Image: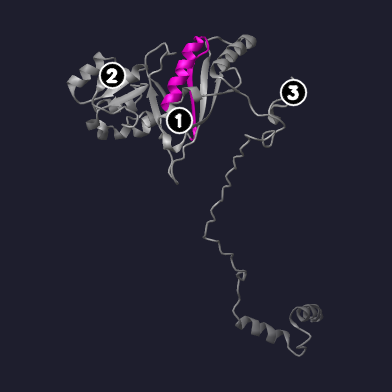
Amino acid sequence: MAAPSRSALRVFPRCQSLFFTCRAPSVSCSSLVAYRQQQPVRSYAAASTKQKEKKDETVQEKVVKERKKVDDTNRHKPFGLTAWAPVDDVYMVRYYPKPVYETSVAIEMLKNFQKLDFSPENQPVYINLRLDMKLEKKKKVDPFVSTIHLPHSFKSDINKIVVFTENPDQARIAMENGAAVAGGAELVEKILADEITADFYLAEPDIIQKLLPLKNKLRKKFPKSKRGSVGMNIPKMLALFKSGHEYMVEDIYVNTQVATLDMPKEYILENIHAIVKDVASHKPAEFGPLIERAIVCSRSSEGLHIKIEEFLPQEEKKA
């Protein structure tokens, strides 16, 4: 009997420390336990009362500040640069305006660079054009793709062309004029299976709907009337695309090969003239010149800014 009494005395102070409060010293342990058993017990944490921040649904448009063009005509030095030209042989290029050369002079410099670098003589020559695509108000010139005949071709092989037509006579004419493959909708499965590949794809207007499964496969090579690859005059289209040179506008730039460095200087100048003239024709003259600046370079040389006013039509030069 003494052992249970001692155990009860040890438990009672613990029960008192847990459930008794100083405000209610007369409450017994058993009554408090009974009261707690009658109350609902929550076995989860209370929800946070912090309100979620509401997201702002209005999207603020980013204001792009246009860089102001400063007229340096009557200034003693260009805006933001040190002087018009360096007075020493050794100087920091970024402190002076980039020199602009005559096109013939730039071609001679590229040929001299090749000799100093011991690089291949037949390396390609590229031209890079930056375009002003703006028209009236918010309108602008859409990016375009064009195929032209260069006066002096730098390719040794002829482009491989596929012609889509359901007319057997037109298919025969296409093969006689240099097409690699000519046929109708039966060619779609072969092209999807990579059994037939080509540089250009030409088609008659009546068969375009049957070629829609090839749109994702061919992408930019898919026949379109804007590119001149859709029409009824198949011999004329073949004459253009067999030896034609294609270039495209990416964003506001045209970057394309115009020649090889081992070609005569006169040939390179005539090819540059042909491309510049064709690019400039895609914007009406009353809205100003389309070409803002031109750079010519070879594969192993630096880019040289060139003057293209001599290649532009008279209306472009006056604008």
Quadrant in the picture for the N terminus: bottom right
CA separation in Å, label 2 and label 1: 42 Å
Looking at the image, tell me whether mark 3 or mark 1 is earlier in sequence order.
3
Q: Are marks 3 and 1 in contact (CB under 8 Å)?
A: no
The correct choice, above or below, for 41 with respect to 196 in the image is: below
Q: Which residue is mark 1?
A: 316
Q: Which residue is mark 3?
A: 87
Q: Quadrant of residue 148?
A: top left
x, y percentage for residue 165?
23, 25
Question: Which amino acid, mark 2?
Answer: Val
Horizontally, is 77 left or right of 198 in the view?
right
Residue appearing at x 57%, y 17% in the figure: 106
> Judging from the image, what secondary structure is the residue with disc 2 in?
strand
x, y percentage for residue 120?
56, 10
Q: Which residue is mark 2?
A: 181
Q: Are marks 2 and 1 in contact (CB under 8 Å)?
A: no
Pick the residue in front: 208 or 113.
113
Can the viewer see residue 45? no
User: The magenta stretch spans which residues?
Assistant: 251-278
